[in-house]
Image (cartoon, coloured by chain):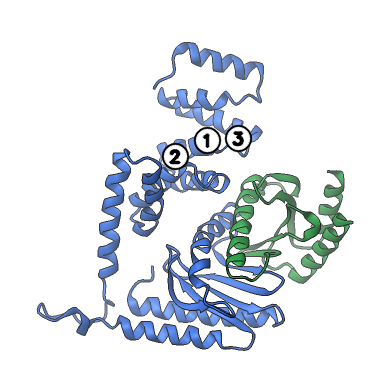
Chain colours: A green, B blue
Amino acid sequence: MSGYAELLDRVNRVTGVRGSMVVAVEDGLVVAEELMLGVPGDAVAALVASIFRRARRSMSAADFGDAAFVQVDGEDGLLFAAAPPQLGDLLLVVVAESWVNVGLVRLEAARVVEALGG
Amino acid sequence: MSASPMQVKQWTDELAADPASTAFLPLARAYRESAKREAALRLVLRGLERHPHHVDAHHLLGLLYRDAGDNVKAADEWGIALALAPEHPGARREMGLAAFARGDWASAVKHLEQAQANDVMDQEVRAALESAWQRSRVAARAAPPSSAPAPAPEAPLPEQWDGGRVFDALAAELGSLSQERGIVGAVMLDAQGFVVAGRMGADRDRAGEISAVLSGASSEAERAVRHLKMGAWKGILVETPRAVVRLAPTGDGGMVAVAGRRDVPMGWVLRVAARARESAERFLAAMGGAR
């Protein structure tokens, strides 16, 4: 668990990130979280996991392969959910401002995921 | 069935002895039935702090918010309950009745059909469902564009209705976008998850297969960004090893979905998706169906 916390902390250092979580994809339960005050982690985790499961089923139906990354764009912020093979049944969820450098977040997320897999 | 004073005391004692006990739920229900709404609300909120994924607690919190007249918060709680347990009968029922109360016939039909399947003897659900069916059909038939002249009483409908030409234009535009470099599909879905036009898939059309699964993504995305105070949702991007898919909301509560091969730049897929959305909005405006 402390390993997750340390790695989430790395993602959160990217300017514009409001927090990140490791979430179980099947039930939306939070495994680890590092969130700014006021971010409703449990509710968002449940909804993001549900969106991810839906995306995964639809991509499979379209024969596009397994969904590995989902991004939800709001007018004033972004949500990312990444499910690389290294994480098994877990999602890395990132909550960020709309002006965040998406590429940088994804790069840091990829590093985090690689480290988790290792 | 109301709780007896003995049961209330038992739950109260249990909770006092163990604050993590789930006895908060029947106790809060008993308080609600005795019109002690504030006490019930405090109990459920405290209970959810310890049990944030307790589906029945989210359902009860929704009922308490509805009792207080806060229908938005109520729908949020039932939405969370359904996100945690899509088959939850109580949350499904309340979502359907709430949609019916606000006149969202399509959403009401979707939820109430499932609620009716859960309990065929529920007369309130049956009555609301039948009414929602009728009203959704009337709404679908009604409303030519407001600028159009009123038809003569004897005029046959097909001569007045221009929907066929409007649909052909939409189908042609989405078909054209599907032929763009690296794009493997562009499709418009309505709020119930039905395909309006377009196709999806490199070899054969899979639009129908994926549309039903995607239909709930819109409301889930909306709730997720609302919880985070991020304003309205603007789109969802999904990446797989073989494809990039962009979903964008349309004015009728539906969405467009555009898929590109993974080897084309993501920015290109986003631009094609923006054009697909413009086509869908033109279609809705011409049909008089946009909200």
Bin the neighbour count of mark 3 within 10 Å (Cα to Cα): few under 14, some 14-19, many 20 and up.
some
Quarter the N terminus of chain A occupies: top right
Of the pair A108 and B82, the residue shown nearer to us = B82
| x then y, percent, for residue A74 | 60, 64
Q: Helix, strand, or loop for circle 2?
A: helix
Q: Residue pushed farthest left?
A: B154
The amino acid marked with disc number 3 is: Leu
| x then y, percent, for residue A107 | 81, 67
Residue bearing mark 3: B48
Residue at figure coordinates x 49%, y 14% from the top left: B7
Query: As drawn, is B91 to the left or to the right of A102?
Result: left
Residue bearing mark 1: B56
Q: Is residue A16 visible?
A: yes
Label annotation for residue B90: 2
The amino acid marked with disc number 1 is: Asp
Query: As drawn, is A106 to the left or to the right of B81?
Result: right
